[in-house]
Structure formats: structure tokens, C-alpha cells
Image (spheres, rainbow, N blue to C red):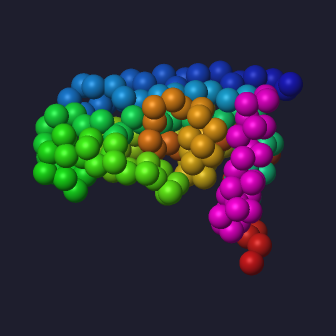
Amino acid sequence: MTTESDAVKSVAGLMALSARTAPKAVGIDSIAIEVLTGKDQTKLAQEMIRDGEALKLDFFRINGEKVRVSDACLLIGVEGRKGLGINCGGCGFATCAEMAKAAKAKKNKTLYAGPNCVLKISDLGIAVGSAAKTASIHNVDNRIMFSAGVAALKLGMLKGCSVAYGIPLKASGKNIYFDVPLRH
């Protein structure tokens, strides 16, 4: 463990705080947050690599390799399949009750479970952006990863969540998350 990796873990906690306190629609917090290190982080990375092979999506493998060598990984998810009772129609259904009924009936074969409340998905986006902003303020290299969120949900790491993202974190002389070649 280096001084830098210890600092990254502290910043991960501050990022979790930023995500938790980010504005939420109608003041209802449906966000779940986990900071992964060590064995849990390795488990997530391995799942991402397996998913990349199974889905034939090389960026899952590349992202998994980056998560594996990161100092920490922040997971942020939302319980999006329960509406807020506003009946805005943003989910594609006339009422929140109709969306909930469709969510219960749907047997997902997709990477994310749906349908989802558009307001809760917006809450997730604001929380993820707030967390990434905090990493940036503290000069911690990071990248928001859909692939890490998919693998985390598959592993049951964010109970009750239907959509999630992962933000791996690293302190090094060069940002490891960019300029990565894809296999074709």
C-alpha cells in the first residue's frame, strides 16, 4: 500500500458523500453506494472480464483489467423500478403503477433491468457526476464505467438496484483509463 493509494481510498469516501448528498427528485433517496477494494474489487474485475468474453464486448475486458489494477472502485446504483408516484410518463408508461406492474412481469435478459423511473435514473446520473467531480477536485484519475455497474449488479453487489455504474480510481503518473487499444 502506498501513500497515494491510501489517499485514493479517502477520496472514494468523499465521492460516496458527494453521491449521497447530490440532489434527488422529490427528495427521495434511492441511491446505493459501495466502495470496493481488495478481494471484492478483484471479484468485480474478474466478472467484467468474463462478461466481455461472453458478450463479445472487448471494452468489458479492458475495463475489467483496469478495475483490477485500480486503487479502489466506487459503485453507485439506483432502485429504479419503483416509481415516485408522480405519473410523469417518462418511463414509457402512463402511471407509476403501470411501470411497476410491467417491471414485475418482465423477465430480463438484458444487461440492466427495466423499465426504470426516468427521475430515479436522473438521480443516478447526478450522483455519479457529483462523485466524479469530487475525484477530479482531488486529482484522482477515474472513469465512469457502465461495464462495472453491469458486473456489480450481476454479482448482487448493490441489492435492489436495477441500474448502476462503477468508477474505478487510481493515482499514478499517467491516467490508466484512457489511450487503451481495443482488440478487433
Pick whichever, 72 or 10, lies toward us. Answer: 72
The magenta region covers 38-61
User: Where 108 sits versus 55, above or below?
Assistant: above
User: Where 62 sits versus 46, above or below?
Assistant: below
Quadrant holding the C terminus: bottom right
User: Where 168 sits versus 63, above or below?
Assistant: above
Q: How many marks?
A: 0
Q: Position of residue 122 (x, y in %)?
A: 32, 44
Outermost residue to the right: 1
Query: Would you say residue 50 sits in the magenta stretch?
Result: yes
Query: Would you say residue 74 sits in the magenta stretch?
Result: no
Question: Which residue is located at x 73 percent, y 35 percent?
Answer: 41
Question: Which residue is located at x 29 percent, y 31 percent?
Answer: 24
Quadrant holding the N terminus: top right
Dividing the picture into quadrants, the one containing residue 80 is top left
| Most frequent secondary structure within the magenta stretch | helix
Left or right: where 139 falls relative to 137: right
Question: Which residue is located at x 78 percent, y 37 percent?
Answer: 42
Residue 125 visible in the shown view: yes
Outermost residue to the bottom: 184
Dividing the picture into quadrants, the one containing residue 28 is top left
Question: Which residue is located at x 79 percent, y 29 percent?
Answer: 39
Left or right: where 64 falls relative to 135: right
Pick whichever, 111 or 13, lies toward us. Answer: 111
Pick whichever, 114 or 152, lies toward us. Answer: 114
Q: Position of residue 54 (x, y in %)?
A: 70, 62
Q: Position of residue 170 (x, y in %)?
A: 72, 39
Residue 70 visible in the shown view: no
